[in-house]
Every structure is written in structure tokens, then in C-alpha cells.
Image (cartoon, helix red, strand yellow):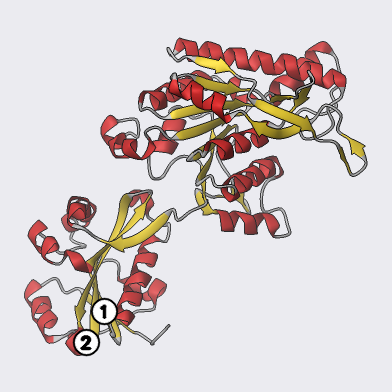
Amino acid sequence: MKPTDLRGILHYIPQFRDKVFIIAIDGAIVDDDNFGNILLDVAVLRSLNIRVVIVHGAGHQIKALAKKLGEPISNWDGTGVTDAETLRIAIMAASQVTHEIMEGLSLNNLRAAHTNCIDAVPLGILKGVDHQHTGKVHQMDVNLLRTLFEEGIVPVIPPLGFDGNGNTYRLNSDAVAVEVARALGAVKLMFICPHHGLEINGKFVSQMSVEELEAALKTSGDKVPANMVSKAHHALRACQNGVPRVHIISGEVDEGLLAEVFSNEGIGTLIYANEYQAIRKAMRKDIRHIMSLMKPSIQDGQLLKRTRASIEKHINEYYVFEIDNNIVGVVAVHPHLEHKIVELASLQVDPDHEHRGIGTKLAVYAESLARELGAEKIFALSTQAFTFFQHKLGYAEGGVDDLPPARREKYEQSGRHSKILTKKLAPGQ
């Protein structure tokens, strides 16, 4: 199912209705051929009553304009020294980008307002260097932004700030986006850039906790590519300041924004500040999702067929793995406590989330439950996934004598000849 399919996004709508998303767009993406599609995606978000703020950069345009004018610039991204000439070019470039965004939003029948909602102060003298016209956010006119929301207007915020004395300061757009997200209590901050997401040690990372990101940035060595270090630091700071989800995605992918918001797997990197994924006890309302997860494995013979009635009868023995309130994995824990043994059954993970360790987490969780119940051994039956249990989880192949009598009878009647896998449970392991 495409993430843009209304049926696919329907269950997200109650979560996001009237919530605030900050869309931080790099200047380079405004010049990309896909930029019009991004604004179309913004229109879809607005149609779902999601409150959107667009914060844009202009570094790409500042460099291009300086080259065209033949003028050297002291800084292009709003973090170093901004001299008077660079500020003049930055104002011209930012105005150009804001105009293109406003024009594109109008094309999609969205009302928008170019705001001066940022009160800025000079960045000042750092390590003996006067940063001149480079500034930092002092405070945000939150009331103005909320008034625009109430009128259905999309605020557009350039990387410029103003003080009460008629001065303009060049700001870093990523830093602005973080401050806007924090001030408005945004549920998502989405950095849209020319890169597909974060890489750690040369490997793309689709999701990571704020703790994992902080550790990666603190560890010595070139773990994060130099061109993504700034995004990583701002994502970290956003999460530490109360933004629960920060996304870093490519702006060159058609429907990428919607795919990131309305699908579990997304297209970029998600950094999450609160508990992003959790295992919980299943409820009756989950039965349809559980059966849907199991259906492919039942059809190819990996799992024994379960009826809705049988799952409902033992629903208190099923546990589901959720990502953002979507069920992507399931496991059952069937106790035979008179023999101090527990069966791990019905372990299944959505194909889109395989190879992410979800099956292992569910199996380890089942073991912890078995210990809490006082079991001394856990077993599982498998026709095709037995190497997973042996190599990943430390199970050993057993025989029918390892099964409790009632389960042994069902095993022999099934004729499936599943491998019997067992594991002793050390207390408190």
C-alpha cells in the first residue's frame, strides 16, 4: 500500500490533527526539481488539519548570489562571522527563497505569511572573534504564530532575526527550526536536505534514540559525516528540548515527506526522544492486526493456522510490538506452569520491519515473562526459523520428551514434524 493512500494514513490522522510540524527546508532543496512536490505534500498535511510552519535556509542561494555579484562572503550558513556585505547578500538571498516558497504555496491554494516573529541578539564575541551581524534567537513571538494557525495560515520563517533597534541578524536556519519547534511544542521537526539521512560509521541509520545519537557524537573518530554533523547536533538539541520526533530526510524523493510521516519505515533517519517502540499485552481490538501479520506465514506453512476464536480465547497470552502505535510484531507466551515450562509461539514480524531486531526483542521479552511466571525452561516449535532460535537466542534442539504431555499430544497429531527447540532459564538472567 502506498503511504499516500488514504486508507494507509487514516489511523495517523487522530494522532496528528491540530498538532504542529516544523518543516525545515535547506536552500539547496528549494532549487531542486522536486521542491514543488514538497509543497504539494505540505498541502496534504494542511488538509488533515496539521499545523505546519516552514523554516527555510538560504546558504545555497547566498553562495550563488555572491558568485554572481563577484563579492566574497565571510560566512554562508549563519554560524560564522557575518560582515556587512555578507548580511546584505543574505537578506537578498533569503528574500528570494521566501518569495519562491510563498509562490509555491499559493499555487497549492495555501495561505501563508512571511513572518518577523524572531527577536534576535548578536552572537557576540566568541573566542576573541566578533561575529558582527551573526545572531541567535532571543525569543519567539509564539502568539503571532498561533494566531496565524487559527486563521489557517502557514507561517514562513526566513533565517533572519530582528532586534528592537532596527538591526537585522543572519541566523542559522537549523537553529531557528529547533527554537520554533521548542517554543510551539511541535510533535515533529523535519529537516529536508540533499542527504538521505544520517550515517554512522558509513552505514545509513533509519532510526535511533536520542541517547544513541548523543553517544555517537561524543565518541572520538569520524562517526558522522562532516556535512551532517550540524544536522545531527541540532536534532539532538531539539530532542533534548522536548521535541519527541526529529526526522532527517532527502528533499529529492517524490512523496518523501508523506512517506516519512505516514509509513512506519519512512525514507530517512528518525531520532526519537521518548519511547518510540514498545511491547505491550495484546487486546481484542488487536486481533485483526495479529491475524494479518500471521497470514503470510500460515500460507507458506511456517505457522500453524489460528482462528480468530482461538486467538481471542488466549488473547491475554499474546504480546505485540508497536512502532508509533502501529503493530509490527507479535509473540505468544503459553504457560504450562505445572511443569515449570513455557511455550514461545506465534512469533511474527511485519516483512517491512525484518532485520531490525524486533523478533529478537519479542523473544527476549517472552523469556523475561517466562521467568516472572516461575518457569525453568522455555520451548518453541519451528519448521523454518529454527536457526534463528539456535544462533540468535541460544536455544538447543530437543525432543518430544521436552514437551509437556498436553502439548506433546498436539505435536504428534499435527504431523508437521517441527523442530523442538528448548532453552533453560537461569533466574534473573
Q: Is residue 305 visible?
A: no
CB atoms of marks 2 and 1 within 8 Å = yes
Up-down relation of residue 246 to residue 167 (above or below) = below
Residue 31 location, x and y as percent? 61, 19
Along the line of sight, which residue is nearer the eye, 341 or 123?
A: 123
Q: Which of pointers 2 and 1 lies earlier in the amino acid sequence?
A: 1
Q: Residues within 10 Å of mark 1 (few under 14, many from 20)?
A: many
Instruction: Give the residue type that dot 1 points to.
Output: Phe
Q: Is residue 30 visible?
A: yes
Is residue 293 shown left or right of residue 220? Answer: left
For image coordinates 59% across by 25% down, the residue present is 29
Could you say which quadrant of the image residue 58 lies in? top right
Residue 389 location, x and y as percent? 34, 73
Could you say which quadrant of the image residue 424 lies in? bottom left
User: To which residue does mark 2 refer?
Assistant: 402
For image coordinates 41% across by 30% down, the residue present is 50
Quadrant in which the C terminus appears: bottom left
Up-down relation of residue 243 to residue 70 (above or below) = below
User: To which residue does mark 1 refer?
Assistant: 379
Is residue 205 shown left or right of residue 261? Answer: right
Up-down relation of residue 47 to residue 357 (above or below) = above
Is residue 85 shown left or right of residue 364? Answer: right
Residue 313 location, x and y as percent? 11, 65
Judged from the image, the secondary structure of the residue bearing numbered disc 1 is strand
Farthest-out residue, right: 128
Residue 224 location, x and y as percent? 66, 49
Quadrant in which the N terminus appears: top left
For image coordinates 41% across by 32% down, the residue present is 258
Whole-angstrom CA distance, mark 2 to mark 1, is: 8 Å
Judged from the image, the secondary structure of the residue bearing numbered disc 2 is helix
Instruction: Give the residue type that dot 2 points to.
Output: Asp
Q: Residues within 10 Å of mark 2 (few under 14, many from 20)?
A: some
